[in-house]
Amino acid sequence: MTGASSFSGMVDKTFWMILGSSVIMLLGITVTMILFMVKYRRSRHPNPSDIEGSATLETLWTVLPTVLVMVMFYYGWAGFKVMRETPKGAIPVTVQARMWSWSFKYENGKQTTELYVPVGRPVAVNLESADVIHSFFVPAFRVKEDCMPGRKNHAWFQAEREGVYDILCAEYCGDKHSAMLAKVVAVPADTFDVWLERGGGRPTGAKLLQLKGCVACHSSDGSKLVGPSYKGLFGKKERVITNGVEREITVDEEYIRRSLLQPKADVVVGYQPQMPEMGNQLDEEDIQLIIDYIKRQ
Amino acid sequence: MAESKTGPAWTGSYLQDYGSRRGLLAWLTTTDHKRIGLMYMAAMFAFFTVAVLLGLLIRLELMNPGMQYVTPRVYNSLFTLHGVIMIFLFIVPGIPAVMGNFILPLQLGADDVSFPKLNLASWYVYIAGAILALMSLFVGGGVPDTGWTFYAPYALRSGSNVSLAVFAAFVLGFSSIMTGMNFITTIHRLRAPGMGFFRMPLFCWGLYATSWIQVIATPVVGITLLLVIMERALGIGFFDPARGGDPVLYQHLFWIYSHPVVYVMILPAMGVISEILPTFAGRTVFGYKAIALSSMAIAIVGYMVWGHHMFTVGMSDTARRVFSILTFLVAIPTGIKVFNWMATLYKGSIRIEPPLLWALGFIFLFSIGGLTGLVNGALSTDIHVHDTAFVVGHFHYTMFGGAGVGLFAALHYWWPKVFGRMYNRKVANWAWGIFMVGFNLLYFPMLVLGIMGMPRRYADYLPRFHGPELVSTVGSWVMVSGIILMAWNLVRAIKRGAPAGDNPWGGTTLEWQTTSPPPQLNFAASPSVTTGPYDHTALRAAAAKEAR
């Protein structure tokens, strides 16, 4: 698989170095084993020699591998060092991960579900998670770093070739872990600038629900997914479990707000308490837009 | 100290009942280390069978892209159970509980372990832990779906029955600690007269290093698992950031145990290989001290490398560098062992028999496991393969190709001692061949997939990963056929095998000096030791005399 980022070449060089010397060692071990099996089998070599050991050999096969693995360590470290030093002027993008979707937020407020990046310019990703641990993995760029709840991790990369590349979640996160996919779209720098300027500003309520991955679990057509549907939700009477006690509530603005900020406070009967707290992903105006949207369904 | 003993306990086999109890009851109340070893074996292989079947189901689902046979939720439970059973119920007790229990006192020239009752208790604790683990499948919120690592905060939020499964792992830890303490004491106190530490067989050295890890590291995971239960039950915020906890703390605590524990799995297997090679090469081992001390070096350095499981969690870059260099250091004593094993074959007089084939299989597979570990140890390459199928392939090469194959080698080596009967060697060789082909078909594609960017624990995958996934699934069928053939051949030998004789392989360590199967108290006359463990001169002299 060819790499497509500025440091993929260096990583791949380390891969070939380690895998190459590994294959040589494995062949050496296997061939020697087979050779000894043939040469010293009892029928050909009935009288064994009791060689107890050799200080020279022990030293040799302690020192040589030590040197070899230190070279490997150095290569690994050198490549890693580049990965950790974000260049000045890198375009900051906040990556928000949650069960089980990704969204990307640019400095001008533009939000997307696909990560647009310019070719030839560094991009700094700030990694966040709303619930459990996820991991931002772009194989083609040789980039991976976990999205940790309660922590801010970072990584960077620079796309070298135009194209569409996979983003995969690499840390197990539950039912739809293997469906937590997105794309990096690497476009020429001037195309990117034009793209970024358009569609800035605040998204609509419907768009927010898409961006934040809500639609993966909540439908708008009445079908039951992981969570309840938005259809006819507002004003409906629901049976919920609050602190282990079942009670009936009416879905109003206050209830929706609480469901977004403290989703485990009132869990609708028949559903699992799985929804992430959305407080750090939505501001007050976003929440109002979502409430307005749900009212219309 | 060569007093001679008389009576049935010194002439008959340990498989016969002595004393007032008979049949099953005699087994369930025995304090004989040999019987306890077999009881572990029976229980462990029952769980192993279940976990192999779960593994086959995982492979079946992954044969084609899309979901075919199970839902993602069921798939997640499948790999969780496969991992939990294989790790906690099969491979951690593994060689020490089965072969260690049986062989260690024999190799030391002792009647039993230091604390025979504690030994029996450890078996019951193991069974209790296993029952708790099974219960977690049927009661409460359903089958755990967290992976065997129980990572926070997912494991804290999962609606499935995590607490009970975690408690089961906690209980199983005590069984491990008891066995470890027993072995350390036995090795220190019950060696035969004349057997200094450096005349001890290398299998005992492997068990010695392992036992220290079990005693020192297991309490860490015990406490960690209790903290998980407290957080789930009482809502105390240790690990969930929503409650003010830190998920990275969980990973540190978990891997402080769970990394050293891979050496609990592998060191006894390395000990087995160090026994088999000199026997079948008909010569002394090469570099005895280097092999013995490298076990201790692996155990000690292995304590300080746990952070390499966490290269992508956002630890400081300095911590990542330190853990990377320490990880590479652990490769060195491992390499020393492999080179000394090769040298043991040099100028030997080699008989190719099933135990030797399994030992050579170990060296080949474990070398792949170790060498792929270098990719994981180097920072820039690990970032790419971390949490991918590459890692799954790597640890199956080390843990199954290493510890598992080491156990199979041990079974073939000591089976005639344990039951006094020889299996069909031709069938054993075939089973080995089929297993080796299947194993590589099954796990090598995972290495390729990981480098291609296929993450682990995926119920479904992108179409471009299909080819290697398909090969891997076919490989699983081939490998399991080999295991079935091997198991059938061994089990059949218990009743129908030809009598094996006391020393069928020409082994030099003390277990070969007693009868097969050994009497209840192991030796008719307590042995004393005047040479190193792999001195073949006496055997050669006897053979020469017979030839004349």
Image (cartoon, rainbow, N blue to C red):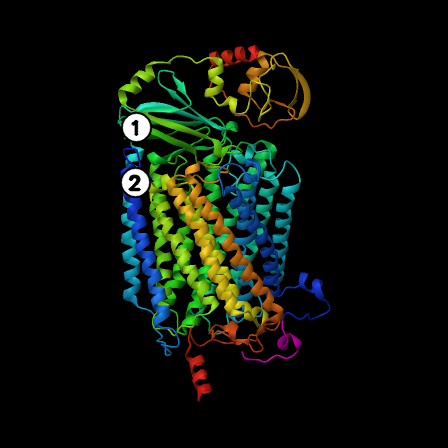
Residue A66 placed where, x, y %? 29, 54
Mark linked to residue A162 = 1
Looking at the picture, tell me which residue is in the foreground, B136 or B46.
Answer: B46
Residue B483 placed where, x, y %? 53, 58
Residue B407 falls left or right of residue A161: right
Amino acid type of the residue tagged 2 in the rendering: Val
Above or below — where is B116 with respect to B315? below
* Residue B431 shown in magenta: no
- How many numbered badges does the structure rendering display? 2
Residue that carries the numbered disc 2 in the rendered image: A11
Quarter residue A135 falls in = top left
**Label 1 secondary element:** loop
Q: Chain of mark 1?
A: A
Residue B197 placed where, x, y %? 44, 67
Highlighted range, magenta? B1-13
3D distance between C-alphas at marks 1 and 2:
20 Å
* Point 66% across, 78% down: residue: B7
